[in-house]
Amino acid sequence: MTQTTQSQQKGIMMSEAAVKQVLSLREKQGKDLCLRVGVRQGGCSGMSYMMDFADPSTIRDDDEVFDYDGFKVVCDRKSILYLYGLMLDYSDALIGGGFQFTNPNATQTCGCGNSFSA
């Protein structure tokens, strides 16, 4: 796994590769956006990860916000209970590439890596 860009104290950690990829994707959007990460019911193992860009004006007072040198990663309070300590990584490998979630709270994960149970 690659090194994180910030201290290990963050509730949601991102590798340098993940930050670089997210910033590249955000640049293609042509707007100053934050990354909203969360969970929802569903998926192979009971819960699935959600990740999408959002306008910073949608950040609520009860959201958890993690700053990566001016880029904000946002998570709602309910989701952070399941995601605290999550490591988001990125690989450009042809097989098995893309964003990868390493969640210390997951008791079971599916083969695709996009859902889990806690």
Image (tube, rainbow, N blue to C red):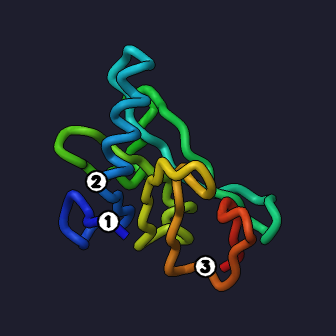
Q: What element carries label 2?
A: helix
Category of crowding for the residue at label 2, using alpha-carbon neighbours closer than 10 angstroms: few (below 14), some (14–19), many (at least 20): some
Of callouts 3 and 1, which one flags the residue occurring earlier in the amino acid sequence? 1
* Residue projecting furthest to the bottom: 107
- Picture layout, residue 2 above or below residue 70: below
Q: In this view, does 44 lie to the left or right of 47?
A: right
Distance CA(mark 2)–CA(mark 1): 7 Å
Label 3 close to label 1 by CB (< 8 Å): no
Q: Which of marks 3 and 1 is in front?
A: 1
Distance CA(mark 2)–CA(mark 3): 23 Å
Residue displayed at 45% across by 31% down: 58
Three-letter residue code for mark 2: Glu
Q: Residue 106 carries which label?
A: 3
| Of the pair 63 and 6, the residue shown nearer to us | 6
Residue displayed at 32% across by 65% down: 2
Q: Which mark is residue 16?
A: 2
Instruction: State which quarter of the image contains the N terminus.
Output: bottom left
Q: What element carries label 1?
A: loop
Label 2 close to label 1 by CB (< 8 Å): yes
Image quadrant assignment for residue 109 = bottom right
Q: Is mark 3 on a helix, strand or loop?
A: loop
